[in-house]
Image (cartoon, rainbow, N blue to C red):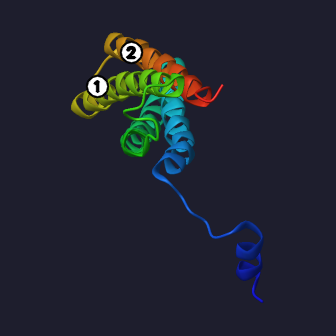
Amino acid sequence: MSLFQQLFELFGRPEWSLIEAHQASTHLSIGLLLGAVGFDAAALLFSPKRAIWREAAFWMQLAGFGLLLVTFGLGYFGNPFAGKQSELAQKTEWHKNFGLVTLGVFGLLCAWRVARFRKWGRIEGSVFAFVNAFGLAAITLTGWMGGHIYD
């Protein structure tokens, strides 16, 4: 008997629902977007190496937003409580709404970054960092809500 056959016999065959894929995918998109915020902060602090930090933040934010779109779609279409009247459905609705806000903020930031990359000065970079901090708060609150749906 092969190793996989033994594992399948012990644990059963892996079956993933969309909501389980949503739960698993959130961590990478959040990590990339948090990393982009960190690299943007480093770009503001370490002027001589600003281009390197900004370049890293650029690619992390684009990849993070792309994964955030996928994560939102998995949660939206995989929501097991959609259309139901319960406390779990209400919590899920709040989580979804905050997810939309988070998606909107990071979508705006990505569009702004693509349109103005390598063109903004210190003031525009500071405004971008402020909006980025708002996105950081939104994604943190959304993730906290998602982690406490079953509480």
Disc 2 residue crowd, few under 14, some 14–19, many 20+, Cα 10 Å: some
Q: Position of residue 42 (x, y in %)?
A: 54, 25
Whether label 1 touches label 2, CB < 8 Å: yes
Near-viewer residue (146 or 45): 146
Point 42% across, 25% down: residue? 93
Q: Which mark is residue 131?
A: 2
Near-viewer residue (78 or 65): 78
Near-viewer residue (30 or 21): 21
Q: Is residue 150 left or right of residue 142?
A: right
Q: Amino acid under label 1? A: Leu
Point 52% across, 22% down: residue? 87
Quadrant of the image occupied by residue 134: top left
Quadrant of the image occupied by residue 100: top left
The CA span between labels 1 and 2 is 9 Å
Q: Is residue 61 left or right of residue 7?
A: left
Q: Is residue 55 left or right of residue 15?
A: left
Q: Which mark is residue 108?
A: 1
Q: Would you say residue 47 is visible in this rendering?
A: no
Local secondary structure at mark 2: helix
Q: Position of residue 43 (x, y in %)?
A: 48, 25
Q: Would you say residue 20 is visible in this rendering?
A: yes
Point 25% across, 31% down: residue? 111
Can you say which quadrant of the picture contains the C terminus? Answer: top right
